Amino acid sequence: EGQLAESGGGLVQAGGSLRLSCAVSALTFDDYTYGWVRQAPGKEREVVSVINIASGSTLHANSVKGRFTISSDNAKNTVYLQMYSLKPEDTAIYYCTAWWALTTAQAMKTLHGVDYWGKGTSVTVSS
């Protein structure tokens, strides 16, 4: 089965930046759409950003559009989330996720159908 391993979370002040990484193993990398899903305690999970490796297509939630950028290094089987202009409301655990045979648009619209989850990396943004 696939394995997703996140890193890069931490504590940052509002307006700061972080880059999250997701190392993918045991998957055919370009068969999947990958994304970042975040969850704050007691709140619903939200699909933040997604990327389809085969097409290069990306989508971002309105809440982060213009501030976050998802990308990949296909040679390294790694997905990134570059986050700028962080806000306190971005505070959450960020999970790397993978959907097989879903487009980016499909992945953005629903959390069901996620095939693989990472264990998460914590992002805390202080005001």
Image (cartoon, helix red, strand yellow):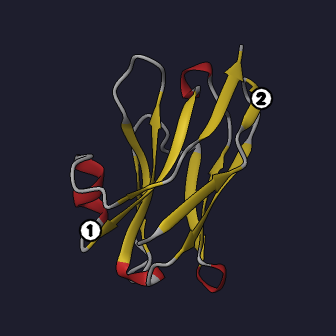
Evaluate if marks 1 and 2 touch, with contact meaning CB atoms under 8 Å apart: no
Instruction: Indicate the position of residue 95 as horizontal and vertical percent values.
Output: 50, 46
Instruction: Indicate the position of residue 117 as horizontal and vertical percent values.
Output: 43, 53
Q: Nearer the viewer, residue 44 or 57?
A: 44
**Residue at the location (47% across, 19% down)?**
41
Q: Secondary structure at mark 2?
A: strand
**First in sequence: mark 1 vs mark 2:** 2
Q: Residues within 10 Å of mark 1 (few under 14, many from 20)?
A: some
Amino acid, disc 1:
Thr
Farthest residue to the front: give it. Answer: 1
Q: Name the residue carrying label 1.
A: 103
Give the quarter of the image for residue 21.
bottom right
Instruction: Indicate the position of residue 1 as horizontal and vertical percent values.
Output: 41, 72
Q: Can you say whether 79 is above or below 117 in the image?
A: below
Q: Can you say whether 73 is above or below 89 in the image?
A: below
Q: Nearer the viewer, residue 31 or 115?
A: 115
**Residue at the location (30% across, 51% down)?**
108
Taking the image as shown, residue 2 lies to the left or right of residue 127, namely left
Find the distance from the CA under tag 1 to the CA under tag 2. 32 Å
**Residue at the location (31% across, 63% down)?**
104
Amino acid, disc 2:
Val
Q: Secondary structure at mark 1?
A: loop
Q: Nearer the viewer, residue 59 or 95?
A: 95
Taking the image as shown, residue 77 lies to the left or right of residue 7, namely left
Q: Name the residue carrying label 2.
A: 12
Instruction: Indicate the position of residue 28 as horizontal and vertical percent values.
Output: 44, 84
